[in-house]
Amino acid sequence: RKEVEQDPGPFNVPEGATVAFNCTYSNSASQSFFWYRQDCRKEPKLLMSVYSSGNEDGRFTAQLNRASQYISLLIRDSKLSDSATYLCVVKTRGTGGFKTIFGAGTRLFVKA
Amino acid sequence: DAMVIQNPRYQVTQFGKPVTLSCSQTLNHNVMYWYQQKSSQAPKLLFHYYDKDFNNEADTPDNFQSRRPNTSFCFLDIRSPGLGDAAMYLCATSSAGTDGTDTQYFGPGTRLTVL
C-alpha cells in the first residue's frame, strides 16, 4: 500500500460545479498535511495547509479526518483556471527531521 | 522576483555522462530539498539538507549525490545518468521549525533528458 494515495482522475467538470478530492495516508503518526497545485510542466505551488479543525480559503475548503486517515479538498464554483493537478502532501516526523511524501495527484479539467 | 532558481531549465546529457543541476534561493531558508518527478507521478524526495546536515532517503540510488556549499546554493550531481533518470528535478526550500508545518517553495525545475 502506498503511503499517500489519491484518485488519479481525471475529473471532468463544467464551470460552476463543485468537486471534491480525497487523499488517504497510511501512517497514523503523520503530523502535517497540505494541498499543492501543479499546472502542466510547472512546479508545485502551495494551495493550502490542512488543519485539524478544517479550513477554508475562498472557494476552497480542506478537511482532515485523523480517525479515518484522510484529507479532502472541496472546490466550489469551479473556474476554468482551476484546471490542474492537485497533490496531497503528508509530513511525518522521522530521524533527520520530517519526511515529506507527495501523492501522485488528482487531475482536474474544468470545461466551459 | 524569483525566490528559488534552478539552472539550467533544460539539460540534455548522454548516457553515463555526469551532470550537475544547481539550485539557489533568496529566501534564506534552512532546508533545501531535491525531488525527482517523472511524468504523471508524484514528486519523489531524493534527499534534503537541514542546514548542513544531509539526509538521504533510503531508496535514493548511489548515483545521486548532493552538495550544499552554503545556505543559498545546493547542487544535485548525477554521476552516471541512465535512461531511467530522465525526469523533472525539482528543488524546494523551507524554513523548518519543529512542528512540520513549514511550507515548501519550489523552483521551476530542471528537465533532464538522457540520450
Image (cartoon, rainbow, N blue to C red):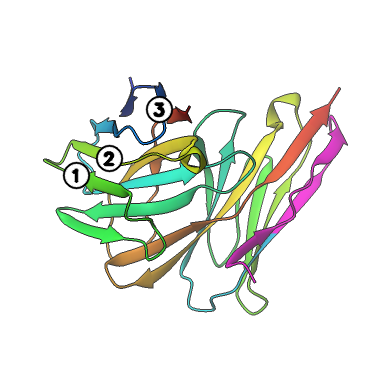
User: Separation of disc 1 and disc 2 at Cα?
Assistant: 8 Å
- For disc 2, the chain is B
Q: Are marks 1 and 2 in contact (CB under 8 Å)?
A: yes
Residue B99 in sight: no
Callouts 1 and 2 on one subunit = yes
Residue B60: x and y in percent read: 38, 57
Q: Residue at x 19, y 39 (%)?
A: B28
Mark 3 — residue? B14
Sequence-wise, which precedes: disc 1 or disc 3? 3
Residue A92: x and y in percent read: 43, 69
Q: Quadrant of residue A107?
A: top right
Sequence-wise, which precedes: disc 3 or disc 2? 3
Q: How many marks?
A: 3
Q: Residue at x 30, y 66 (%)?
A: A97
Crowd class of label 1 (few under 14; some 14 to 19; many from 20; radius 10 Å) = some
Q: Residue type at mark 2?
A: Asp
Q: Secondary structure at mark 2?
A: strand
Mark 1 — residue? B67
Q: Are marks 3 and 2 in contact (CB under 8 Å)?
A: no
Residue B104: x and y in percent read: 39, 46
Sequence-wise, which precedes: disc 1 or disc 2? 1
Residue B28 among those drawn in magenta: no
Judge depth for marks 1 and 3 and give the one in front. 3
Q: Residue type at mark 1?
A: Arg
- Please give the range of residues in magenta: A1-22
Is the N terminus of chain B in the top left, top right, bottom left or bottom right quadrant? top left
Judge depth for marks 3 and 2 and give the one in front. 3
Residue A9 among those drawn in magenta: yes
Q: Secondary structure at mark 3?
A: loop
Q: Residue at x 19, y 36 (%)?
A: B73
Mark 2 — residue? B77
